[in-house]
């Protein structure tokens, strides 16, 4: 917090100098307001960040062409602040505007477009519009697959986002598939003891528990894909591994080991 306070003080001093030295709508003033907004956002002062971002946007609207990428960034920043403040409808409107500009200003597979689709997906998700959230997350992933290396961590994050929406929609097998893909990428992209790997394994185990409970409650057999996932995650690789229900408790059983879920 101390370093952020120092940074904020320096940025505000720089802004005061620029206000005197530059014309009132000079682009560098917009940069100063934007930087102040970034620091305020990091320390959780969202109202102050919002005010700075909005001032930056006002200047950019005068100083820049109407579809300049910096305008999209400002709309995105303002939308993010409204999201953090719980005003999701306002956030959505601004993020949509940011995306519209980026579609015009940027190549079709620019990473910033993926960011926009993802941000819109987050808002849809928060508002409970899961089908729309899923569509936005999937579009973000499509762009990332072209714009990024095949095992970039951001691809894993997108797969995880998609899985979480499938979970909320009750599509547990699809959620598991996306979680497994996320884990595959993380295992290549991250060090073996990275916390995100632990989170991925945990998410998969939780999803397996859900699938087992669903199978038990509805008295149906797990599909081979799910059974294989259980064997893989739990380290049980015997080909005769079976799902066994014993007095209402689901277990994974074979000749060598039995693991409880």
Image: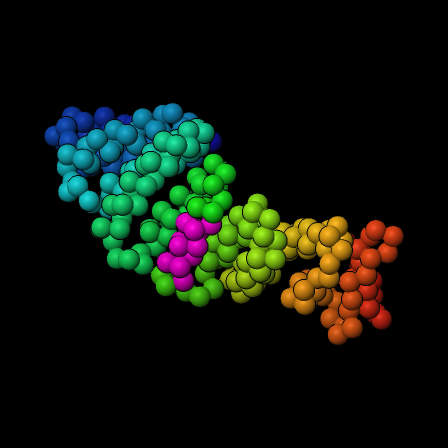
Furthest residue toward left: 23
Secondary structure character of the magenta stretch overall: helix
Stretch in magenta: 134-145
Q: How many marks?
A: 0
Point 73% across, 61% down: residue = 221
Image position, residue 18 (x, y; %): 19, 30
Point 47% across, 41% down: residue = 129
In this rendering, the answer to whether 104 lies above or below 227 is above
In this rendering, the answer to whether 258 lies above or below 98 is below
Residue 201, by quadrant, is bottom right
Q: Quadrant of the C terminus?
A: bottom right
Which one is nearer the viewer's eye here, 43 or 85? Answer: 85
- Residue 129 falls within the magenta-colored stretch: no
Image position, residue 98 (x, y; %): 29, 42
- Residue 136 falls within the magenta-colored stretch: yes
Image position, residue 26 (x, y; %): 15, 34
Q: Is residue 132 visible?
A: yes
Q: Is residue 222 left or right of residue 177?
A: right
Image position, residue 39 (x, y; %): 38, 34
Q: Is residue 201 left or right of residue 189?
A: right
In this rendering, the answer to whether 11 lies above or below 107 is above
Which one is nearer the viewer's eye here, 197 or 122? Answer: 122
Point 57% across, 57% down: residue = 174
Point 22% across, 50% down: residue = 104
Q: Is residue 138 left or right of residue 64?
A: right
- Give the colouring mode of the picture: rainbow
Q: Is residue 5 visible?
A: no
Furthest residue toward right: 247
Which one is nearer the viewer's eye here, 195 or 91? Answer: 91
Which one is nearer the viewer's eye here, 225 or 62? Answer: 225
Q: Is residue 97 left or right of residue 26?
A: right
């Amino acid at each position: 917090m101390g370093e952020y306070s120092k940074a904020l003080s320096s940025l505000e001093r720089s802004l005061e100098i620029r206000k005197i030295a530059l014309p009132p709508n000079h682009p560098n003033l917009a940069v100063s307001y934007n930087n102040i907004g970034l620091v305020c956002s990091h320390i959780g002062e969202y109202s102050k960040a919002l005010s700075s971002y909005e001032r930056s946007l006002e200047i950019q609207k005068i100083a820049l062409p109407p579809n300049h990428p910096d305008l999209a960034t400002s709309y995105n920043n303002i939308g993010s602040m409204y999201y953090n403040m719980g005003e999701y409808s306002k956030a959505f409107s601004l993020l949509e505007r940011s995306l519209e500009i980026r579609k015009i200003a940027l190549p079709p597979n620019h990473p910033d477009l993926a960011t926009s689709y993802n941000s819109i997906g987050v808002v849809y998700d928060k508002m409970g519009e899961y089908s729309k959230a899923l569509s936005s997350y999937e579009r973000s992933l499509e762009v990332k697959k072209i714009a990024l290396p095949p095992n970039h961590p951001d691809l894993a994050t997108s797969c995880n986002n998609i899985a979480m929406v499938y979970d909320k929609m009750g599509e547990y097998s699809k959620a598991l598939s996306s979680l497994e893909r996320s884990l595959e990428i993380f295992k290549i992209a991250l060090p073996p003891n990275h916390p995100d790997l632990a989170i991925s394994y945990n998410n998969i185990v939780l999803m397996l528990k859900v699938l087992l409970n669903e199978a038990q409650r509805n008295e149906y057999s797990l599909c081979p894909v799910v059974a294989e996932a259980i064997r893989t995650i739990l380290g049980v690789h015997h080909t005769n591994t079976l799902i066994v229900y014993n007095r209402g408790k689901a277990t994974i059983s074979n000749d060598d080991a039995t693991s409880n879920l």
